[in-house]
Amino acid sequence: MKKITISFNVLAAIIAVTILQACASTSGTQCVCAKPTLTPPSGSGPAGTTITVTIATTTGAYLRYTLDGSTPTCGSSGHGTLIAAQTGVVHVPLPDVFGRTLKAIACKAGCADSPIVVGNYTASH
């Protein structure tokens, strides 16, 4: 059996590439998380009901979202509700008069935040 020696720098690079797969490298120096997707991207339904929306992003990132039109932010003290990317299911309530604006962002330590995705959900009358 042949013994293989891997230097610490090579091992660290392999681990970093594995961890950062959730976000793509754009300039070779920093990764940027992919913009999340919303399914459905917008919609309407009867007043007083909810629309189930799936927020998806690349594996390894986490998501933050808001339903009040404010902008979600990343980080340990980020703004918005935190959910795991694997879950990604949000129930959007449709009030009697106004709709809801869902905004979501993908986040990962060591990577730039994703662009924000916006979905508009309204109550039909």
Image (cartoon, grey):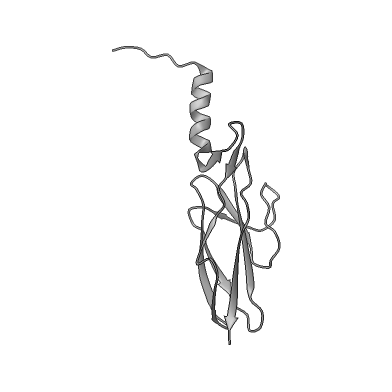
Considering only vertical position in the picture, is 47 above or below 68? below
Q: Quadrant of residue 33?
A: top right
Front residue of this view, candidates 19 and 120: 120
Residue under the point 32% across and 12% down: 2
Considering only vertical position in the picture, is 13 above or below 20? above
Residue under the point 52% across and 73% down: 51
Front residue of this view, candidates 87 and 14: 14
Q: Is residue 84 left or right of residue 102?
A: left
Q: Position of residue 123 (x, y in %)?
A: 59, 81
User: Which residue occupies the extreme top position in the image?
Assistant: 2
Residue under the point 70% across and 59% down: 71
Image quadrant for the C terminus?
Answer: bottom right
User: Which residue occupies the extreme left position in the image?
Assistant: 1
Image quadrant for the N terminus?
Answer: top left
Considering only vertical position in the picture, is 51 above or below 36? below
Q: Position of residue 112 (x, y in %)?
A: 64, 42
